[in-house]
Image (spheres, rainbow, N blue to C red):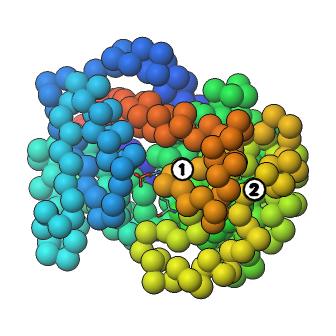
Amino acid sequence: MTRHFLRDDDLSPAEQAEVLDLALRLKADRFAERPLEGPRTVAVFFDKTSTRTRISFSVGITDLGGSPLIISSADSQLGGKESVADTARVLERMVDAIVWRTFAQSGLEEMAAGTTVPVVNALSDDFHPCQLLADLLTVKERFGDLAGRTLAYVGDGANNMAHSYLLAGVTAGMHVRIGSPADYPPRADIVDDARRIAATTGGSVLVTTNPHEAAAEADVVVTDTWISMGQEAEKAERIAEFAGYGVDDALMAEASEEAIFLHCLPAYRGYEVEASVIDGPQSVVWDEAENRLHAQKALLVWLLAQNATAPTATAP
Ligand code: CP
Ligand code: NVA
C-alpha cells in the first residue's frame, strides 16, 4: 500500500517523531539527502493561492535533487475538466510524488486511491498537515520535547489549521486547547479522533468558547486568519463574530512566561493578532515559515523511502 500524507494522523506518533528528527538533520545539513537525484519530478498542484507552500516545495524538491513541476489549476485539466481518477493514473506514469493544495479533502482521497505514488496534502478545507510539521519543528527547536507541552489555538476552531493542531498536537503528546466562538467549533469527528490519539500518547484535548481558558499558562499560543481561502464572501460577518478572539498582549500575558507565538501566515494584523504580538519578542513566525522547507523535505524523503521498501500489491 502506498503511503500518503492527507491528514496529520496519517503519521503515527513514532513516524511523526522520525520525520521531525529528519527535518532537524536536514536543517543542519541541507543537502544530506538526495532521493530525487536524476532528476525525478514531483508535481505540485495549486487550486488556491500560495506563497510559502509553493516556494518551500519548489526549493525543497530541488534541494533533494529533484525537479518541481508547479501547476496552477487554471493551467491544467484538473478541476472540472478531467476527473481526479484519470489525472491520478496519468501522473503516476511520469512523476514520483503528487502534492496538491485544494478545497475538498475528498479530492485528495480520490487522488490517493487512484495512484501508486505518494500524495501530499498541501492544504485542504479540512487540514494543513505540512504546516503542522513545520510548527511542531519550531516548538521542538524552542522547547526540546513536545510531549506534555500545552498549545492554545485561539480563533476559528472550524478551519483547517484548528483541525490540524488537534490531530498533530496530540500525536506529539501535546495538550491541545481550542478557544473559538460557539458557532465555529472544530468538527466533532476530528475532536473524537484527536481524543482517541491523545489517550495513547498522554496528550489531551480541550474545546472551549473562552479564549482565556485556552491560553492560561500555555507554552504555545497560536492563531490563524478568521477568513480562510474560499470564505471571502463571509468577511464582514466573520470579523464581527470573532471579536474578542484575537491574540493581543493581554492574552499572551496569561500564557506561560516562556510562551512562544505561532501563526502559519499570511497574517492580518489588527484582526486575529495584534502587531505587538506577531512582531514582538515571543513571536517565532519567521522560523516557522522557514521550517516549512525543512519539514516538507523530511516528509518527502520519508514517504519516498516508505514507498520504495513497501511490498507492492502485485508482488509475489
Ligand atoms: N502558511 C501557508 O501555507 O502559506 P501559503 O498560503 O503562502 O502557502
Ligand atoms: N486557514 C487558512 C490557512 C492559510 C495558510 C486558509 O485556509 O486560508
Q: Is residue 256 left or right of residue 174?
A: right
Whether 110 is drawn above or below 165: the answer is: below
Residue 248: assigned label: 2
Q: Which residue is mark 1?
A: 264
Quarter holding residue 180:
bottom right
Q: Please name the residue shown 59% across and 50% down the image.
A: 263
Q: Position of residue 148 (x, y in %)?
A: 80, 38
Give the SS element for disc 2: loop
Q: Please name the residue shown 31% across and 55% down the image.
A: 100
Q: How many marks?
A: 2
Residue 41: assigned label: none
Q: Please name the residue shown 32% across and 32% down the image.
A: 60
Q: Is residue 157 left or right of residue 6?
A: right
Q: Position of residue 141 (x, y in %)?
A: 63, 26
What type is the residue that disc 2 sits on? Asp
Give the SS element for disc 1: loop
Q: 185 and 310: which one is in front?
A: 185
What type is the residue that disc 1 sits on? Cys
- The 10 Å Cα crowd at callout 1, few under 14, some 14 to 19, many 20 or more, is many
Q: Please name the residue shown 81% across and 34% down the image.
A: 258
